[in-house]
Image: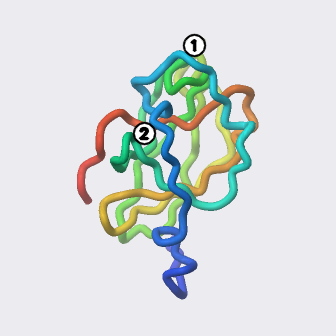
Amino acid sequence: MTVAFQSFSSDPCYNYESLVRPWRANNESGDYICDESFSWNGWYRLFYYGMNIQMSETCVSSYSCNTEYTLWLNGPHPQIEDGVVIREVCGNYYWGDCCNFKTKPIRVKACPGNYYVYELVNPQIWCSGYCTGNVLFPTF
């Protein structure tokens, strides 16, 4: 499904909140920061020390990203021509497979300028957190 926007102000590529939290990277660990305590509302663009970064598309080891239950995108990121897409979010914990549980799906959009925006929602899983990769993503 593709969504067309009537104006720049309604397009999430131009109407988002910057999420500058480098501890979300999958190469970070130590603290336990839990996303269910945040008030998610709207679209977010992810940054890692000032650089664009995307959510992980592969399983992230539990206790990475400074959280206990790691959340990752179960599916590929869209291309610009795909518009807004809905993606499943998997959660990993140290037992079982990498998708021990699923949270509410999120919406994702590829934007001009080689970045993504995400409509993040409360994961409703105790001490879970959305994880990002630790490298910049390729250009579209």
Q: Position of residue 114 (x, y in %)?
A: 31, 60
| Type of the residue with mark 2 | Glu
| Residue at 46% in and 28% down | 59
| Residue at 33% in and 69% down | 112
Helix, strand or loop status at disc 2: loop
Q: Position of residue 9 (x, y in %)?
A: 55, 80
Residue 57's label in the rendered image is 2
Residue 44 image-quadrant placement = bottom right
| Residue at 67% in and 30% down | 34
Q: Position of residue 51 (x, y in %)?
A: 33, 47
Residue 13's label in the rendered image is none
User: Which residue was labeled with disc 1?
Assistant: 94
* Badge 1 density bin: few <14, some 14–19, many ≥20, Cα 10 Å: few
Q: In the rendered view, does 32 fall on the left or right side of 75?
A: right
Quarter holding the C terminus is: bottom left
| In this view, 15 is above or below 45 | below
Q: Nearer the viewer, residue 98 or 138?
A: 138
| Type of the residue with mark 1 | Tyr
